[in-house]
Structure formats: structure tokens, C-alpha cells
Amino acid sequence: MRLLHSNRPAGAQWSRVLGAWLAENGFDEMDKGVRSRLQNCLDNLPAIEMWRQNIGLGQRLQLKPPERPSCLASSNNPTFA
């Protein structure tokens, strides 16, 4: 957004710049739903890390792969419920 001198991620120019960045960094082949869930995880990373420290190894091993962060939604984790 700094490059575009904008404080809002919207518009044709934003889409072009974002598309170029995604391609340059190898994210253009990633499903946009997966990218959205990844962004949600990144936005909540401190809460996720704290939550993971408070669950046992057994529960951590039962979690689904990273492309399915919906597995984080549980009664034990109100951040994502």
C-alpha cells in the first residue's frame, strides 16, 4: 500500500500490484481461500501460539493440516470459535 500511496487495499491498481507480488513470491498458484485463511492465521499468530502452548501433544497431533485452519475452532480456543 505504501508503494501505491494508499491506505486502502482496493481498486484496479491495487489488484495489479498485488497480483504481481503474488506471482513474484509464488503465491499466485495458491487457492485464494487458502490465502485468506493463511492471512487470518497470520493476523492472529500471537493468540495461536499461546493456544498451542496450552494444549497437549496428543491434541496437537490430531489437528488437521495447515490448509484447514478451521480445525482451530473449538471450545478450547474461543479466538476462532
Image (spheres, helix red, strand yellow):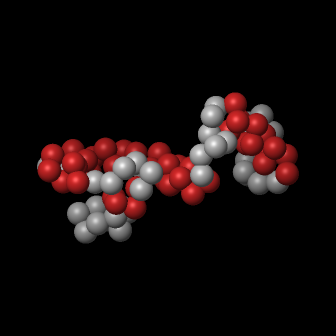
Q: Is residue 59 left or right of residue 38?
A: left
Residue at position x 70%, y 31% in the image:
24
Quarter of the rendering occupied by the N terminus: top right
- In front: 35, or 45? 35
Q: Is residue 3 visible?
A: yes
- Whole-percent x, y for residue 67 in the image: 45, 51
Q: Is residue 21 above or below residue 37?
A: above
Quarter of the rendering occupied by the C terminus: bottom left
View extreme (front): residue: 29
* Count of numbered circles in the view: 0
Residue at position x 72%, y 51% in the image:
9
Q: Is residue 19 above or below residue 81?
A: above
- Whole-percent x, y for residue 16 in the image: 81, 44
Q: Is residue 44 above or below residue 21?
A: below
Q: Is residue 27 above or below residue 68?
A: above
View extreme (top): residue: 24
Residue at position x 59%, y 46% in the image:
30
Quadrant assignment, res 45: top left
Q: Is residue 5 visible?
A: no
- Whole-percent x, y for residue 34 in the image: 53, 53
Residue at position x 67%, y 42% in the image:
28
